[in-house]
Image (spheres, rainbow, N blue to C red):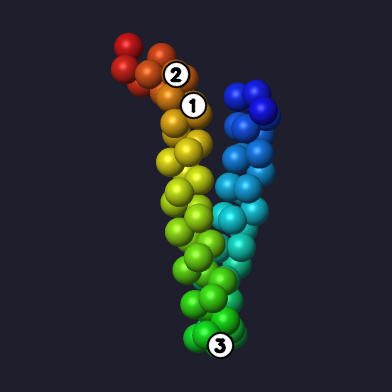
Amino acid sequence: MTKLARMKAVNVLLALLLAVTALTGILHGHLGTEAFAHVHVPCGLLLLVLSMVHLVLNWSWVKANLFR
């Protein structure tokens, strides 16, 4: 898998996880505590991990634009 294909996959997954995490956060009062814990917390953790992967995959851009 090329770097570009990995970045595209990570970006799509990040968008989906962000949407699910935000939606479950907004609907927290309407979801049961158990449903919230089974969806929101794992999605939030995956969002954090994939954000770090996204940063690693784009590190050359970060260095070029932020650390001139």
| Amino acid identity at mark 1 | Asn
Disc 1 and disc 3 in contact, CB within 8 angstroms: no
| Amino acid identity at mark 3 | Gly
**Disc nearer the start of the sequence (1/3):** 3
Q: Distance between the residues labelled 1 and 2?
A: 6 Å
Q: Distance between the residues labelled 1 and 3?
A: 38 Å
Q: Residue at x 52, y 85 (%)?
A: 34
Reply above or below: 2 against 14.
above
Q: Which residue is drawn at 50% across and 29% down?
A: 57
Query: Label 3: which residue?
Result: 32
| Amino acid identity at mark 2 | Ser
Task: From the top left corner, tell me how far across and down residue 47 is, in percent.
Answer: 50, 53
Disc 1 and disc 2 in contact, CB within 8 angstroms: yes
Quadrant showing the N terminus? top right
Reply above or below: 17 against 51.
below
Disc 3 and disc 2 in contact, CB within 8 angstroms: no
Residue 5 is left or right of residue 49, and the answer is right
Task: From the top left corner, tell me how far across and down residue 50 is, in percent.
Answer: 50, 45
